Amino acid sequence: MDTLLQGAAERLRAAGVPTPRLDAECLLAAALGCNRAALYGRREVVPAEAASRFAALLGRRAAREPIAYLTGIREFWSLPLKVTPAVLVPRPETETLVEAVLDCLRASASGPLTVADVGTGSGAIAIALAVELREARGFAVDVSPGALAVAAENARRFRVDRRVTFLQGDWTAPLFAAGLAGQLDALVANPPYIPTAELAALDPEIVRFEPRLALDGGPDGLAFHRELAATAPRLLRPGGWLALEVGAGQAEAVRALLAAAPGLAVHPGVRDLAHRDRVCLVRRPEAAG
Ligand code: SAM
Ligand code: GLN
């Protein structure tokens, strides 16, 4: 088996895959229907059927298809989420966003919370929040019906489907239509933020396989942050939070546009955004607004 893995890793290395041995092991485990750790003690030869599944997966990985689309699973917030090419593969930096929102809500809000995740993709953010906040109800929006189908399946898988409602449409429009104006304790999003002209230079895994709809943030990458800054104040309840993921190097610009948005104020008690420069957090003031 080690020869099989070595050959596979060589092939992936030659194709430019950054972690060839690890990927070969993941794919062999997927082909055998076991986990990667189980490969180590294994002595039996790989059965022919599994070997041909492995060869097919290897070919796709050598063409730089993301490993998560090949295995159909990516862990996020310790939840093994289903992923398909209809959704962005959830990233670790988005766990920082979830953590930041939980910190804010736990410090500032009480009672049953209402939270929304706009551009939900696999449902990663909405589902992680619902799992953590057992009393909360959530709303998850995406424009892509294919993404919403995956997100809804994930919500069922992690038993939060009774508390998370999936809405199809353009950004916050479905939230207004659902009567949520002034109701949200938190509006959270990881919007597309790659400047259009930079898309072509991304790794092949991203640019060839992930949905362009999940990546393209317009000419400067901030089209959707602007859109959310403009509509969030009318959805948040006084004291409610807007939390946005931003691309590397974008935090300063997003902070400036959030500071300029009427009805939002950076709360002085929040841990400085500079410490988590992939997350921007602002709050609707408690009193007026
Ligand atoms: N929230 C997921 C995550 O963090 O893994 C996915 C984030 S992905 C960067 C952005 C998502 O926004 C995609 O699922 C895409 O379909 C969705 N999207 C793009 N344009 C949209 C629009 N106009 N209205 C609502 N969702 C949109
Ligand atoms: N995190 C993605 C990347 O690899 C981008 C996702 C997004 O645009 N929000 O660049």
Image (cartoon, rainbow, N blue to C red):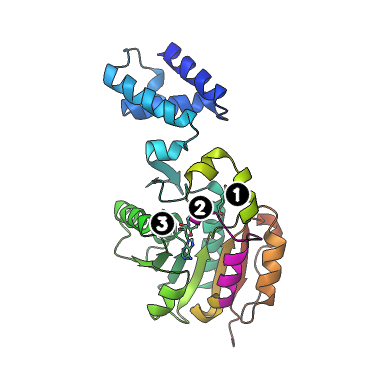
Residue 123 circle label = 3
Is residue 281 a member of the stretch shown in magenta? Answer: no
Q: Quadrant of residue 165?
A: bottom left
Residue 199 circle label = 1
Give residue 201's position: percent from left, percent from top: 63, 44
Of residues 35 and 148, the one nearer the viewer is 148
2 or 3: tag closer to the N-terminus: 3
Left or right: residue 264 versus residue 36 is right
Q: Quadrant of residue 271?
A: bottom right
Magenta residues? 212-230
Is residue 216 a member of the stretch shown in magenta? Answer: yes
Of residues 76 and 113, the one nearer the viewer is 76
Q: Are marks 1 and 3 in contact (CB under 8 Å)?
A: no
Give residue 106's position: percent from left, percent from top: 51, 66
**Which amino acid type corresponds to the residue marked 1 in the rendered image?**
Leu
Tag 2 secondary structure: helix
Q: Is mark 3 within 8 Å of ligand 1?
A: yes
Tag 1 secondary structure: helix
Q: CA distance from mark 1 to mark 2?
A: 9 Å
**Which amino acid type corresponds to the residue marked 3 in the rendered image?**
Gly
